[in-house]
Image: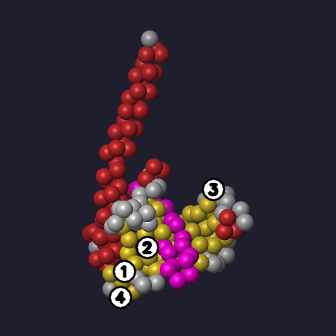
Amino acid sequence: MNRNDKFEKSKITKASTNKVVTNVYYDAFGIEKVRFQNANYTDKTSIDCYLDFEEVALLATDAASGRLIKELEAGQKTISMGGSKSSKNYNGAPESRIFSLGRSGDKIFINMSRGKGKITETGAIAPDGSPDLKIGVGMTIDKFRSLMIFTHDAVNGYLPHMVNAIVRQCEAERQAAAENQQ
């Protein structure tokens, strides 16, 4: 990765073909998420999905052990359903985004879809009809495994900083509360 290139410096890793790419970014670490982006080089469309650090850890562990690869033999697996409550793509209406994985032969596909969404009774965002954009990026099983493991390694590199900051803040709050009781 060329960290001097403005398009590459904030990426953890990527997997690409001559038509599509999955980019994985550092820029959502502050909200304890990893941003995955599928983009189509030809029509310049893209979809962003955000996975919690815990989801990344589970995917990486299952990819490393082979469990996930075996699960995908049975069919596609939805990893995350989400979106935004107000989207410029749908004139302020909710946007649904789905992140799923599939397998065909010796390839793993990171699939993302985007479409109009609706807010459920619990506040979640669900699809409202069929998606109007789908981008799937195929890669070898080994590339998928390395993408997930390396992403998890990047999260693990960030966690000590984050956890230490939280512990310091909690300790300061505990001490302040103790002083206020005296």
**Colouring mode (rainbow / by chain / secondary structure / one colour):** secondary structure
| Residue 64 badge | none
Which is more foreground, mark 2 or mark 4? Answer: 2
Instruction: Say whether residue 154 is left or right of residue 127.
Output: left
Q: Work out how far the residue at label 2 is from the one at label 1, CA to CA, in angstroms.
A: 10 Å
Q: Work out how far the residue at label 3 is from the one at label 1, CA to CA, in angstroms.
A: 36 Å
Density class for disc 4 (Cα within 10 Å; few <14, some 14-19, many ≥20) is few
The boundaries of the magenta stretch are 38-53
- Disc 3 and disc 1 in contact, CB within 8 angstroms: no
Q: Position of residue 128 (x, y in %)?
A: 67, 71
Residue 103 shows up from this direction? no
Q: Amino acid at mark 3?
A: Thr
Q: Work out how far the residue at label 2 is from the one at label 3, CA to CA, in angstroms.
A: 31 Å
Q: Secondary structure at mark 3?
A: loop
| Residue 122 badge | 3
Question: Within the magenta stretch, is there residue 42?
Answer: yes
- Disc 2 and disc 1 in contact, CB within 8 angstroms: yes
Q: Position of residue 56 (x, y in %)?
A: 39, 61
| Residue at horizontal 52 percent and vertical 83 percent from the top | 42
Q: Which residue is mark 1?
A: 139
- Disc 4 and disc 1 in contact, CB within 8 angstroms: no
User: Can you tell which quarter of the image residue 110 is in?
Assistant: bottom left
**Most frequent secondary structure within the magenta stretch:** strand
Q: Work out how far the residue at label 3 is from the one at label 4, CA to CA, in angstroms.
A: 38 Å
Q: Position of residue 141 (x, y in %)?
A: 31, 79
